[in-house]
Image (spheres, rainbow, N blue to C red):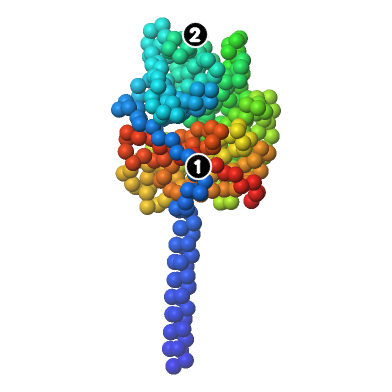
Amino acid sequence: MKSAFLFFIILGLYLTGCQNQSIENTNKNKDQSSLIFDSSVSSFIVDSFKIKLDPTTPIKSPNIQYLEGKNQLAMMNASMNEINFYDLETTKLEKKVKLEEEGPNGVGKVRMFRIYEDKLYVLNSNQFKFYELDFSGNVIKKYDLNRDNAPKPYATTWQPIIIELPFAYMASTPYRDYNSKSFYEANDLMTRLNLETEEIAYSITYPDKIKGNLWGPNLSDKFYTYNSEQKKFVISWPPISDLTVGDFNGTKLISAPSKYTIKPEPVDEVPRDFKKSHAIFTTNPQYGRIYYNKYKNEYYRIVEQRVPERYIDSQDYDEKNLKPFSLMVLDSDLNVKKEIEFPHLKYYHFMVFLTKKGLYMAKIPENEDELVFDCFQFDDNEKV
C-alpha cells in the first residue's frame, strides 16, 4: 500500500514537472514568434537631419526623394497635392510645387512623383494617367496608361517610379483574379512606358516558390530598388529569401536569407473582411523594402517580424501596424554582410533617403511639428 501511495506521489510530481515544462516551452515559442528588438543602433549613427514642418505637412510622407545636385529633400504632401522641397543645409522649406487637380494643368489627386534631371513626373494611379511637368506644375505631356484587359500601373513608397530615359517603369497589378492561384502565374508585374513613342510593355513574374499558393495582404506584393549604374532591378518578395535580379528582358534569382526564420503562411482564401486581412498582415513575418546605395554599391533589405501580441489590439496606429524589424546589409553581389536589429517603435523604415553620408531613416516623431532623420553608416566588411 505504501509502495502504491509513493508511486502516485512520484507520478504526480512527474506530471506536474512535465506540465510546467510544457508551459515553459509554450511561452518560449510564444516569445520567439513575438520578437521585440530593443538593441541600440547608436554606434551606426553618424549624423542627424531635422526639419520643421509647416502646419499643412503631415509627418508621414508617401514619397520622398533626395536631390543630389541641389542637396534638397523633396517630400510629397498628399493632403495638399503638392511637393515640398527642403534644403539639407538650412533645413528650411525652400519651395512648394502645387499640383493642380483640374484644368489644363490638372493631374488629379497624386501620391507618387519622381524627379529626373529637370523634369517632374507624377502618376495618378486612380485614373491610370502619367504626367511630365515642369517645376511650376505645368503639364508638358500626358500619357494614358489604361489598356483594355491589361495590367493597371501604380506606384508606392516601396515600388517607386523609375526613370531611365527613354523609359519610365512602374509596378502593375495583373488583370487576373486576386483570389485565384492563377494570379501568381502573371508575367506582367511591371509596366514600362516609352516616353518618346508612348508604347507600353509588361514584364516580371513571380518566382516559382511563390506560385501554387494564395498569399494574404502584403505577402502578394513586391518591393524593388534600381541600380542605375548596372541598369538592373532588385526585387524583394515578402514570403521568400530569394531576390529577383535583372532587367526588363531577363532576370535570375539570388538567395539572401535573414538570420531569422521568415516563413509566412499562405491562406486558403483571401479574406475581404478588413479585420481578417489585418490579422494576416500582423501575424506573419516577412521580407520587406530594399534600397540601393549607389555611393557604397551595397543594398539594404528590411526584415519584419510579426506585430507583438501586446500591441495587436492597441488603439495607437503605429503600435498595431509597425512590425519589429532588422536591416540586412548586402554587398554588390547581394551577399549578406550583416543584419542589424533596430529598436522597436523608434523608426519608420519606409521613410528613407540616401546620400554620400549614408542612409537616413525617419524617427517616429514625438511631436507633429518636427521630423528627424538619423543617418546610418554600416562600414564593417565582414560577411556573416
Q: Residue at x 47, y 81 (%)?
A: 11
Q: Residues within 10 Å of mark 1 (few under 14, many from 20)?
A: some
Most extreme residue toward the bottom is 2
Q: Residues within 10 Å of mark 2 (few under 14, many from 20)?
A: few
- Check disc 2 and report the residue beneath it: 140
Q: Amino acid at mark 2?
A: Ile
In the image: residue 318, left or right of residue 196: left
**Disc 2 on helix, strand or loop?**
strand
Q: Is residue 109 above or below residue 234?
A: above
Residue 298 horizontal/vertical position (percent): 62, 38
Identify the mark at residue 46; answer none if there is no mark: 1
**Does the image show residue 259?**
yes
Which of marks 1 and 2 precedes in the sequence? 1
Most extreme residue toward the top is 104
In the image: residue 329, left or right of residue 351: right
- Place residue 16 in its image quadrant: bottom left
Residue 286 horizontal/vertical position (percent): 52, 44
Q: Residue at x 57, y 39 (%)?
A: 300
Q: Is residue 132 above or below residue 46?
A: above
- Relative to the observer, which residue lies in front, 309 or 182? 309
- Relative to the observer, which residue lies in front, 72 or 158? 72
Residue 343 horizontal/vertical position (percent): 45, 49
Q: Quadrant of the N terminus?
A: bottom left
Q: Residue at x 61, y 9 (%)?
A: 197
CA–CA distance in space, label 2 to label 1: 41 Å
Residue 100 horizontal/vertical position (percent): 38, 13
- Place residue 50 in its image quadrant: top left
Q: How many marks?
A: 2
**Disc 1 on helix, strand or loop?**
strand
- The reply to whether dot 2 and dot 1 touch (C-beta < 8 Å) is no
Q: Residue at x 55, y 17 (%)?
A: 117
